[in-house]
Image: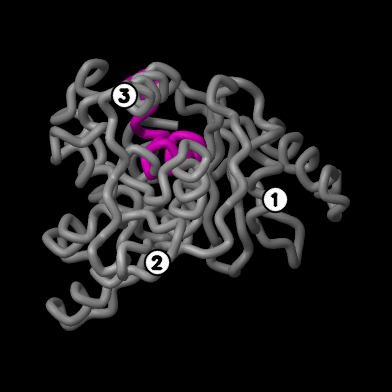
Amino acid sequence: MSAGSWRTTLSMATRRGIRFSRRPREIQRQYKVAAHVTAVPIMWLMSQASGREVSLTPHYHEIRGRAAEIARAQGSPVGGAEHLFLGMLHDGGWPVTLISAHVDLAKVEAAVLAMINDPGYSPPPPPRTLVRNGTLLGNGYVRPWGAEVAFDIGDSYLGLEHAFLAMIRMRESIPARALAALADLDGLEAAIIEAKNAPPSGPPDDAVFLPEGQELDGPLRRAVADALPDGTTFAFNIGPDERTWIHVIDLGGTSDPALTRQVLNTALASLNRPMLDG
């Protein structure tokens, strides 16, 4: 796959729901997704200000749940940028796949954890609207990042790319400080924006479609991620016939349909679901 088509594929992550999943073995950790995440008042404010409906993408909702669990595991009742960023790293999806081309994700995670574990670290304070008579309401709240970025760009949704851009633009945030020692923040921002603005395209020639009637739901996505060989990721989207396709890609941007079929069948078999024929 050419660099141009790689950027096109990344753009589809924001425009058409495609997601990437790369889980380096160093950061494969299991965090139970929080059952409930407090509502987001800022999204209502954005909707009122812009006259458009603004909502979190399903991927963002999922990562906020992970971030809430990470925050609780570290003793913080409220999730901040650091916890949301760790959730993004552990998920390995867009935009982390693009970030991984510029920086070692294991080193980034280690830097973030070092800051959280520093004696001078203070957990993020809860919003005043969630505190009543000194008691925190809505345990598991994770601040949504990126609303202002989405509004400025003119997007009617809030995705993780908006959250990441907001984090690195706020240079004093823990994700920005961790990344600044390892990568060029301006270069990361430019790469995200370029990928986001690249024109979308249809399924690549080497894409493999799921069996008829199958959906790439959460359990299957995790099973596919677990079946990936080291140094690979996978992309997916919905084709013109409403069927889901995926392809497994190595870090050089090449894809082998035979490997994609092998990974997909391994994942389907682990869930006792019908596999691809042939």
Q: Amino acid at mark 2?
A: Leu
Residue, disc 3: 115
Residue 54 appears left or right of 203: left
Residue, disc 2: 137
Tag 1: Cα neighbours inside 10 Å, few (<14), some, or many (≥20)?
some
Cα separation between marks 3 and 1: 34 Å
Residue 26 lies within the magenta run: no
Q: Which residues are magenta?
A: 84-104
Q: Position of residue 272 (x, y in %)?
A: 88, 51
Which residue is at a point 71% across and 33% down the rendered structure image? 227
Q: Nearer the viewer, residue 47 or 102?
A: 47
Residue, disc 1: 220
Q: Nearer the viewer, mark 3 or mark 1?
A: 3
Q: Earlier in the sequence, mark 3 or mark 2?
A: 3
Residue 18, placed above or below residue 94: below
Q: Quadrant of the C terminus?
A: top right
